[in-house]
Image: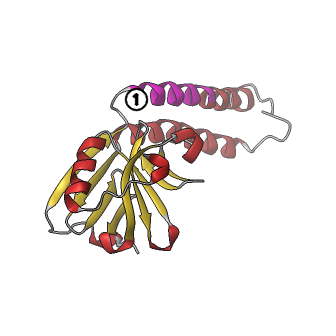
Amino acid sequence: MNCPNDTHSDTKVLFSETQRFEEGWSLGILLILALGTCISVDILFIYGIIQQLVKGQPFGNRPMSDAGLVVVSVLMLIITVFVPLCMMFSKLTTQIKEDGVYVRGSIFNLVNEKYGWSLITKSYVRKYNPIGEYGGWGIRRGKSGEAYTVSGNMGLQLELTGGKKVLIGTRKAEEINEVLTGLGRNQPDAMHD
């Protein structure tokens, strides 16, 4: 099994990569989606407050209490600003060490995994379809298993004992191939060559 508490191993780092959402086109898409969502949601709740609190007319067919509307409006404003900011400042760090593959995500440390070589039955770099296989980028579960991705369509595929599959996005596919080959652990899957 993966050992989340052992990600600070002192074994030699053979490969390291840190990716951020703010790099490349993903930041532009993120900002457009975030701003569009924020503006739409926040305008709706501001309109509701004006309608109900200022004009004294109920907002909607089944209006909330005035206090409830204010609380929900403030929470929505916080969420629509906070979530995009967190995504902009989050990062995904991948390391390949002598004893396994480490994945760590920042901001809330939602990801802090070690996949030891004894648990990995196959490891190889492959092209993937982020939307088709995982429903997008980020921390995902899809028809092809679990994925930790920031952008792009290249990833380190790990097949684990018990049949579990984990894909870790990368912008350094060639470097990972070299490291895996050097370790004798580059086992490309015939379907993804």
Residue 161 lies left or right of residue 49; in this view the side is left
> Which residue bears the numbered disc 1?
27
Amino acid, disc 1:
Leu
- The quadrant of the picture occupied by the N terminus is bottom left
Q: Main secondary structure of the magenta part?
A: helix
Residue 86 lies left or right of residue 144; in this view the side is left
Residue 119 placement: quadrant? bottom left
Q: Nearer the viewer, residue 191 or 44?
A: 191
At a point 70% along the width and 41% down the height, the residue shown is 66
Magenta-highlighted residues:
25-40
Residue 178: % across, % down: 22, 49
On screen, residue 180 above or below 32? below
Residue 100: % across, % down: 27, 66
Residue 19 placement: quadrant? top left
At a point 78% along the width and 33% down the height, the residue shown is 59
At a point 52% along the width and 37% down the height, the residue shown is 80
On screen, residue 2 above or below 43? below
Instruction: Name the element at disc 1.
Output: helix
Residue 61 within the magenta-colored segment of the rendering = no
Q: Nearer the viewer, residue 68 or 7?
A: 7
At a point 50% along the width and 40% down the height, the residue shown is 78
